[in-house]
Image: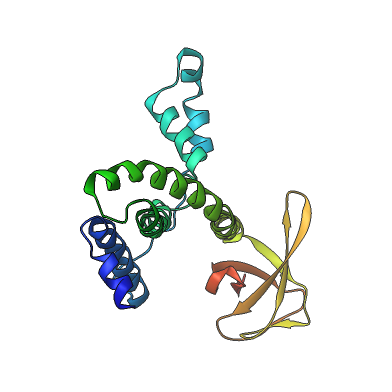
Amino acid sequence: MIELFNAAIAPHQVLLTLLLALVVCYWLLVILGALDFEADLPDADLDLDSDGHHAHHGMSTGGVWITAGRLFGFSQVPIVVWLSFLFLFMWFLSLVLNEKWNPSHSILQTFILLLPNLVGSLVITKLVTIPVARLFKAMADSDTEAEVVIGRTGTVCSIEADETYGQLEITANGAPLLINVRTQGGTLVKGTQAKITSAGPDNAFYFIESV
């Protein structure tokens, strides 16, 4: 442990250690609630469509940024998540590369090893963020679904709907959609027309009221 600490604060490693420390501090503040973590994903497809005419006249700056984002993975996850992974892998690979190829801790050799470190870290970050991106996409889809159904009116199809259980049937795109619902007081019997007022925690169910 002492050897790891000494290696982490060595001159060739200390900058990456400071960056990693900032990442750790940020996530600690998020966990403690001192900072709000906004997981809004950039809508790359929308940007491409809205500016599609530029594709016929050469790639714009926005097009380059979108292409880079798709290539390296930072367009699929919040940038702070992507940077957290990148700094973590760069810190670790720096330890490994310098231990093997720079035992004398030469600053010049450190800069030379920075290029393979960055390339390797970008590849690993891209691979790691693939499943993470799927998680954020599922969260975004859940939020979109909530925005679509809130304000809709349907029919209670369970025996009753109360503060602990209930199901509501609404029509979506011509097909019936069955969702889990709760009331915020009182009981609604089967066949009652009810309006969806808001989403519950994690959009696991929705609150309804009689109309």
Considering depth in this image, is 9 or 176 the residue closer to the camera? 9
Query: Residue 5 location in percent, x, y?
Result: 28, 72
Q: Farthest residue toward the front?
A: 104
Q: Is residue 90 above or below residue 50?
A: below
Considering depth in this image, is 77 or 2 the residue closer to the camera? 2
Count of numbered circles on the image: 0
Q: Farthest residue toward the top?
A: 57
Q: Quarter of the image for the N terminus: give it.
A: bottom left
Q: Is residue 105 left or right of residue 93?
A: left
Image quarter of residue 19? bottom left
Considering depth in this image, is 94 or 173 the residue closer to the camera? 94
Image quarter of residue 188? bottom right
Q: Is residue 17 left or right of residue 100?
A: left
Image quarter of residue 153? bottom right
Q: Is residue 193 visible?
A: yes
| Residue drawn at point x = 50 percent, y = 19 percent | 55
Q: Is residue 8 above or below residue 207?
A: above
| Residue drawn at point x = 43 percent, y = 53 percent | 82
Query: Residue 185 location in percent, x, y?
Result: 56, 85
Query: Residue 95 location in percent, x, y?
Result: 36, 59
Q: Is residue 76 visible?
A: no
Q: Is residue 184 above or below residue 147?
A: below
Query: Residue 85 location in percent, x, y?
Result: 43, 57
Considering depth in this image, is 36 or 76 the residue closer to the camera? 76
Colouring chosen for the image of the structure: rainbow
Q: Is residue 193 left or right of residue 82?
A: right
| Residue drawn at point x = 24 percent, y = 50 percent | 106
| Residue drawn at point x = 57 percent, y = 52 percent | 130
Q: Quarter of the image for the C terminus: give it.
A: bottom right
